[in-house]
Image (cartoon, rainbow, N blue to C red):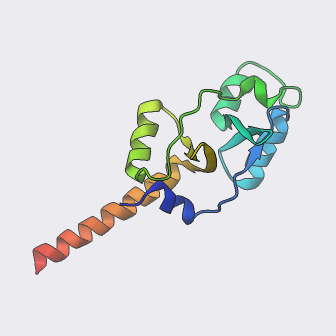
Amino acid sequence: MHTIRSVLSRKDREVVSVSSTDTVLHAIRLMASQGIGALLVIDDGELVGLLSERDYARKVILKGLRSDATKVADIMSRELVSISPDHSAEQGLDLMTEQFVRHLPVIEGGRLVGMVSIGDLVKWVIRDQKLAIEELERYVSS
């Protein structure tokens, strides 16, 4: 079974982030250019929040706010759910399901080491399940 650490080791290690003082327009443009659905919000080296496309849709578009005049701090999620790199990908999916989140900052020793998305974890859980099925099929046919 793959751990969050092994998932992180196989993806781009760069953590894409914005500052809480950046405009939402800047953040959305950054997400679009990187092809991602969420950004970590980091101020002075400290993780202070997460901004997702869902935050944007619900807190800017539906409220009629202007992206170029709204700060990330005004709409970011501050109550973060995080995970350790030693947890399994399956445990990460369980946590996401329980907490209704799609992105998890990965924290080790109080330090941010990356972020995983629900798509990252689904991919690895499916790989683990395929390997288990192949092993069972070999066992049954031998």
Residue 129, image quadrant:
bottom left
Q: Residue at x 46, y 31 (%)?
A: 99
Residue at the extreme front: 109
> Could you say where residue 19 lies in the image, as x and y percent from the top left?
81, 38
Residue at the extreme bottom: 142
Name the residue nearer the viewer: 107 or 97. 107
Residue 11, image quadrant:
bottom right
- Up-down relation of residue 121 to residue 6 (above or below): above
Label count reads 0
Q: In this rendering, would 130 be left or right of 29?
A: left
> Could you say where residue 137 lies in the image, as x and y percent from the top left?
18, 72
Q: In this rendering, would 7 be left or right of 142?
A: right
Q: Quadrant of the C terminus?
A: bottom left
Q: Quadrant of the N terminus?
A: bottom left
> Could you say where residue 53 lies in the image, as x and y percent from the top left?
67, 37
Name the residue nearer the viewer: 38 or 41. 41
- Up-down relation of residue 130 to residue 121 (above or below): below
Q: Residue at x 76, y 43 (%)?
A: 45
Q: Residue at x 75, y 39 (%)?
A: 42
- Up-down relation of residue 34 to residue 26 (above or below): below
Q: In this rendering, would 7 be left or right of 50?
A: left
> Could you say where residue 15 lies in the image, as x and y percent from the top left?
69, 52
Q: Residue at x 56, y 50 (%)?
A: 116
Residue at the extreme right: 69
Name the residue nearer the viewer: 35 or 61. 35
Residue 14, image quadrant:
bottom right
Q: In this rendering, would 142 be left or right of 38?
A: left
